[in-house]
Image (tube, rainbow, N blue to C red):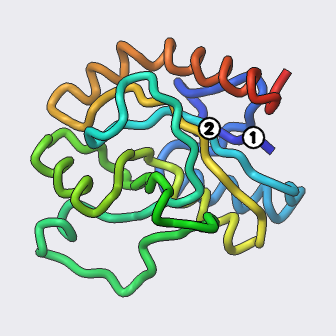
Amino acid sequence: MIVCAGEIESFSFATPIGIGLVNSAINLSRIAIMTPPEFIIFIGTAGSYGKHNIFDIVESRTASNIEHSFLLNSAYTPIDNVISTADDVSHETIVNSSNYITTDSEISKKYLDKNIYLENMEFYSVMAVAKEFSIPVGGIFCVTNYCNENAHRDFLANRIKAMKILEEYLKNRGVIK
């Protein structure tokens, strides 16, 4: 099953699950209970903390849920904030998820220091739901912006082209027809 956030990031061949951590978790859980898929592929756009370039395609099976306050040593969490289905996490691109988009390039550097290279609002919750229901999962992303002061503007400017690149990539890989 191919899923996406929806709204301005909708694909004709993907089921929308909602924007952000909460909506995507609720809606994907509902799907997993009612009609459990054999495999989940989450597709969408992502912001780069600096390692990946605009319009790069990145596949991942590892997500984190780290907030800026953790990087600034002003918070801690008792939860396991990294989920992976990868055989070798050291070679994985970790995609961070938060309900907030990073607009500070200095914070982006702190994510890079932790080997976290992309951000997407939904991927961590998709990974968490898939883990809970024992469903194999992965994500495929097209980079639309860097995580800096121009993040939103660049996302809006590049979103449509990124979605077309992503769709073409999925066709070339035989994921969709």
Residue at the disc numbered 1: 2
Q: Position of residue 59 (x, y in %)?
A: 57, 43
Viewer-nearest residue: 145 or 17:
145
Viewer-nearest residue: 120 or 111:
111
Residue at the disc numbered 2: 43
**Quadrant containing the C terminus in the rendered view:** top right
- Under circle 2, the secondary element is strand
* Residue drawn at the location 37% of the way across and 24% of the way down: 54
Indicate the quadrant where residue 69 lies: bottom left
Q: Earlier in the sequence, mark 2 or mark 1?
A: 1
Mark 1 crowdedness (10 Å alpha carbons): few <14, some 14-19, many ≥20: some
In three-dimensional space, the C-alpha distance between marks 2 and 1, rounded to whole angstroms, equals 7 Å
Q: Is residue 155 left or right of residue 28?
A: left
Q: Is residue 41 left or right of residue 51?
A: right
* Residue drawn at the location 75% of the way across and 29% of the way down: 173
Q: Position of residue 151 (x, y in %)?
A: 26, 29
Q: Amino acid at mark 1?
A: Ile
Q: Amino acid at mark 2?
A: Ile
Q: Is residue 45 above or below residue 61?
A: above
